[in-house]
Image (cartoon, grey):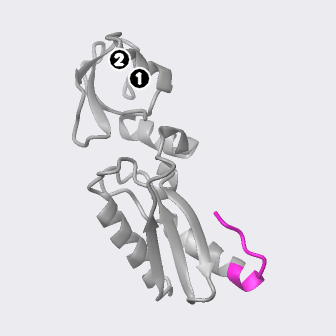
Amino acid sequence: MTSAQDPDVAGLLARAQQLLDTVCDPEIPVLTIADLGILRDLHWNAAENRLEVVITPTYSGCPAMSMIEVNIRAALQEGGFDRVQVHTVLSPAWTTDWLSEQGRQKLQAFGIAAPAEASLDQKALLGEPKALRCPICGSSNTQMISQFSSTACKALFRCLDCLEPFDYFKCH
C-alpha cells in the first residue's frame, strides 16, 4: 500500500488498512480482499479530502466485484471514512501470484486446493492430466470432474483415495 510522509495521513491509511483487512470475498468468505491480492493500493487524496482504494478483479467479468466495492465502502464508512472512492483497474491483470501465503493456507484449511504452479495449469492445454493434492487427505491421486465449479475461478476435482470432491482455485 502507498505510504505517506505526513504522520496524520499515515495514521489514516493504517486505520483504513485495518478496516479493509476485514472485507472478505463474497464467493470465498474465508479470504479477505487482501488475501486475494485484489486490494492493490490505498491512498489519501488531500485535494479532494477522500480515501481512494484501488482494486483489481480476479476476472474482468467477476460478478463479485460490485459486492466487494459495496463492502469496501461499508467497512470504511462504518470506520469513519465518509468520502471514499473505489477505482477498479484491469491492468496489470490479476494473477494467482498475488494470492498471499496466508490466503493459500486459508483455502487449504477451507477444503479448496490452492492454485498450483502456472506451468501445471498450462499442461492441461496439452491434454495432460493435472495432479493436485487433495486438501482433505493430502493424496495426489486426484482427477478433474469439471473445468468449472461453483464459480468461474474454480474447477471441481475428486480425490480417488478419500473419494471426496473438492474445489481447485485455478491459476491465471
Which amino acid is tagged 2? Ala
For the residues labelled 2 and 1, say whether their Cβ atoms are less than 8 Å apart.
yes
- Split into 4 quadrants, where in the image is the C terminus? top left
Element type where label 1 sits in the image: helix
Was residue 166 drawn as part of the magenta stretch in this picture? no
| Pointer 2 residue | 124
Q: Residues within 10 Å of mark 1 (few under 14, many from 20)?
A: some
Mark 2–mark 1 distance (CA, rounded to whole Å): 5 Å
Residue 20: x %, y % from top left: 50, 68
Element type where label 2 sits in the image: helix
Magenta region, residue range: 1-9
Is 73 left or right of 39, judged from the image as shown? left
Residue 107: x %, y % from top left: 42, 40
* Residue 134 in sight: yes
* Residue 139 in sight: no
**Residue occupying image coordinates x 22% and y 41%:** 150
Which amino acid is tagged 1? Asp
Is 32 left or right of 148, judged from the image as shown? right
| Pointer 1 residue | 121
Was residue 6 drawn as part of the magenta stretch in this picture? yes
